[in-house]
Image: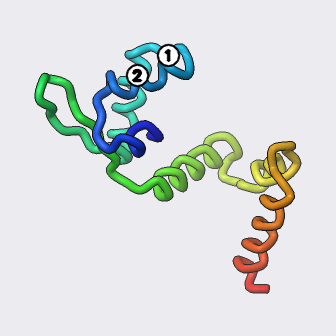
Amino acid sequence: MKVVWERGRVTVRDVYQTLLERRQVAYTTVMTMMNILEQKGFLKKSAGDDRAYLYEPAKSRKSVMRAMVNEFVERVFGGSANPLMLHLIEDEHVTRKDLDDLRKLVRKKGGD
């Protein structure tokens, strides 16, 4: 999705070649994932000039991330976000600023 958001309209080959710069990935894996993202409504597919389909974002980053996180929480944590939040808070990658931002959001959400 990041590649599609960055470029706007892409083919499977465009995404595949971009991902190859970072890590080894199979073309068929990229194609499968893009088809799944299209089925979920995250991508729109249209016919291109040379038989290759063109893909573009169907939804905003924010709405796609929300849907993906919700799906992850449901699948991995049985719908409870608490274990995920505890893990993230305890993780060394969470900065003091991250925690401060989280505290503010919790206060705002809780109405305090």
Q: Amino acid at mark 2?
A: Tyr
Q: Is residue 94 left or right of residue 4?
A: right
Q: Circle 1 is placed at which residue position?
A: 25
Which dot marks residue 106?
none
- Counting other residues with Cα less than 10 Å from the Cα at mark 2, is it few (<14), some (14-19), or many (20 or more)? some
Q: Who's the residue at 53% across and 51% down the image?
A: 65
Earlier sequence position, callout 2 versus callout 1: 2
- Whether 57 is drawn above or below 106: the answer is above
Mark 2 residue element: helix
Which dot marks residue 16?
2
Front position in the image: 44 or 23: 23
Q: Amino acid at mark 1?
A: Val
**Residue 1 placed where, x, y %?**
44, 40
Front position in the image: 23 or 75: 23
The quarter of the picture where residue 23 lies is top right
The quarter of the picture where residue 18 lies is top left
**Residue 98 placed where, x, y %?**
78, 59
Q: Who's the residue at 14% across and 23% down the image?
A: 51
Q: Who's the residue at 18% across and 38% down the image?
A: 46
Q: Is residue 65 left or right of residue 56?
A: right
Mark 1 residue element: loop
Quadrant that contains the C terminus: bottom right
- Counting other residues with Cα less than 10 Å from the Cα at mark 1, is it few (<14), some (14-19), or many (20 or more)? few
Residues at marks 2 and 1 touching, judged by CB atoms closer than 8 Å: yes
Q: CA distance from mark 2 to mark 1?
A: 7 Å
Q: Is residue 52 left or right of residue 25?
A: left
**Residue 81 placed where, x, y %?**
71, 55
Q: Who's the residue at 86% across and 43% down the image?
A: 92
